[in-house]
């Protein structure tokens, strides 16, 4: 048995290998829509923990406190990631726990700290049909060969499940592959499949299937969900480009096949080490046959400016123009202009 002194030394070594970091952001929004609003907002605060158990095994945890109107304090905590990573051989790994579903560049590279986002918020597709999280097992390879090839294969709880339970046997499956042919560039594709015996979205996924744009009766039967993604990212000294494309299909016995898509394109131009000007387009279209998200068409266009005070503090100012259409037929688009300012920090 280990002595008390040995336990103490082991504890000291563990503390030396464990790092605690935090990220947060504050925002100001002026919404010039039909109902004008002007307000300040306290954003997500992200507590980031990493630990190296030994040369082969490590841990990562990410815990977020965010606004939730149903709580007494209007803020609630959530576990966003919590996994153990085993280095099986060379650059190959086995990961067990709750992860960001590695379907595209954004979800694979960024975490919840807005400090690292190129724009103020995520692409629209993340609010509708990109499953943000999976609880399960992941096989991963990184920086293999001359093209720095990488792969991720994941089996785990699907869209309609939680972190503690699944009411059906069939798990979700995803696979993604990428190359990094030059410094700052990454090109990747991904695929995700899930069969929902009940058409609901579990809280763990971060996935919101039918938001406030649809108020009619909800379809609760079985649904087959497929998602294919393509990502191109290049972050160089003179130009920054990120394109995230997603093609989603859902199939029900009621209305058959629905075909949905989204595309987010970011273009940034660093004008100095501390300043970047940028623009983006963000489009999502959901078919009239879709019974998971329900029919909508949204477009978002933005121009922005980022000021970096240091590696762990930046300020983004963004002017956005929205076109929003939901429902069938010739319903008119809702149009609005918004000004957003975000102060992001790490500590």
Image (spheres, rainbow, N blue to C red):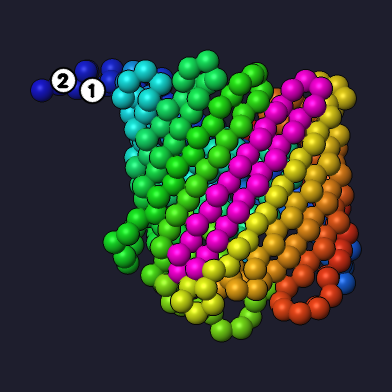
Quarter of the picture containing the N terminus is top left
Is residue 227 located in the magenta-colored stretch of the structure?
yes
Query: Which image quarter holds the C terminus?
Result: top right
Q: Secondary structure at mark 1?
A: helix
Residue 124 in which image quadrant: bottom right
Instruction: Please report the bounds of the magenta region as a residue range.
Output: 223-251
Magenta stretch holds residue 330: no
Q: Secondary structure at mark 2?
A: loop
Residue 107 location, quadrant: top right
List x then y, in percent, for residue 286.
65, 65
Whether residues under marks 2 and 1 lie with C-beta atoms below 8 angstroms apart, the answer is: yes
> Residue at (43%, 58%) from the top-left corner?
194
- In terms of secondary structure, what is the magenta stretch mainly? strand
Side of 256 relative to 89 (left or right): right
**In this figure, which residue is indicated by the disc labeled 2?**
3
Q: Residue at x 52, y 43 (%)?
A: 190
In the rendering, at what x and y percent does residue 276 appear?
Answer: 83, 30
Measured as percent of width and height from the top left, residue 17 is found at: 41, 21
Along the horizontal axis of the image, is 188 left or right of 234? left
Q: Identify the residue shown where x is 74% and y is 55%.
A: 283
Nearer-the-camera pick, 150 or 4: 150
Q: Is residue 289 visible?
A: yes
Asked if residue 80 can be seen in this view, the reply is no
List x then y, in percent, for residue 76. Answer: 53, 57
Q: Is residue 288 left or right of residue 338?
A: left
Residue 180 versus residue 167: which sits nearer the camera?
Answer: 180
Instruction: Please name the residue that numbered disc 1 is placed on.
Output: 7
Q: What residue occupies the far top of the structure in this picture?
A: 146
């Amino acid at each position: 048995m280990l002595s008390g002194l040995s336990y103490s030394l082991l504890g000291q070594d563990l503390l030396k290998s464990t790092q605690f970091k935090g990220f947060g952001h504050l925002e100001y929004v002026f919404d010039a829509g039909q109902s004008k609003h002007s307000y300040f907002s306290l954003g997500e605060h992200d507590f980031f923990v990493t630990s190296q158990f030994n040369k082969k095994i490590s841990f990562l945890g990410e815990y977020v406190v965010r606004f939730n109107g149903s709580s007494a304090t209007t803020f609630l905590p959530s576990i966003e990631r919590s996994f153990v990573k085993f280095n099986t051989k060379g650059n190959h790994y086995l990961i067990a726990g709750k992860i960001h579903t590695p379907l595209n560049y954004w979800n694979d590279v960024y975490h919840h700290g807005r400090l690292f986002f190129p724009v103020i918020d995520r692409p629209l597709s993340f609010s509708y049909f990109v499953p943000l999280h999976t609880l399960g097992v992941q096989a991963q390879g990184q920086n293999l060969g001359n093209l720095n090839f990488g792969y991720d294969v994941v089996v785990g709880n699907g869209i309609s499940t939680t972190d503690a339970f699944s009411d059906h046997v069939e798990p979700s499956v995803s696979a993604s592959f990428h190359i990094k042919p030059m410094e700052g560039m990454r090109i990747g594709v991904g695929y995700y499949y899930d069969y929902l015996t009940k058409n609901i979205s579990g809280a763990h996924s971060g996935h919101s299937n039918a938001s406030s744009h649809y108020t009619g009766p909800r379809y609760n039967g079985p649904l087959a969900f497929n998602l294919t993604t393509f990502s191109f990212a290049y972050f160089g000294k003179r130009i920054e480009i990120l394109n995230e494309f997603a093609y989603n299909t859902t199939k029900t016995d009621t209305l058959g096949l629905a075909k949905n898509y989204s595309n987010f394109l970011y273009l940034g131009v660093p004008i100095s080490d501390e300043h970047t000007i940028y623009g983006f387009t963000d489009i999502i279209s959901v078919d009239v046959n879709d019974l998971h998200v329900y029919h909508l068409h949204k477009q978002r266009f933005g121009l922005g400016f980022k000021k970096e005070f240091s590696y762990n503090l930046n300020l983004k100012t963004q002017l956005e123009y929205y076109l929003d259409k939901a429902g069938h037929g010739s319903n008119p688009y809702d149009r609005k202009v918004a000004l957003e300012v975000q102060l992001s920090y790490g500590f």
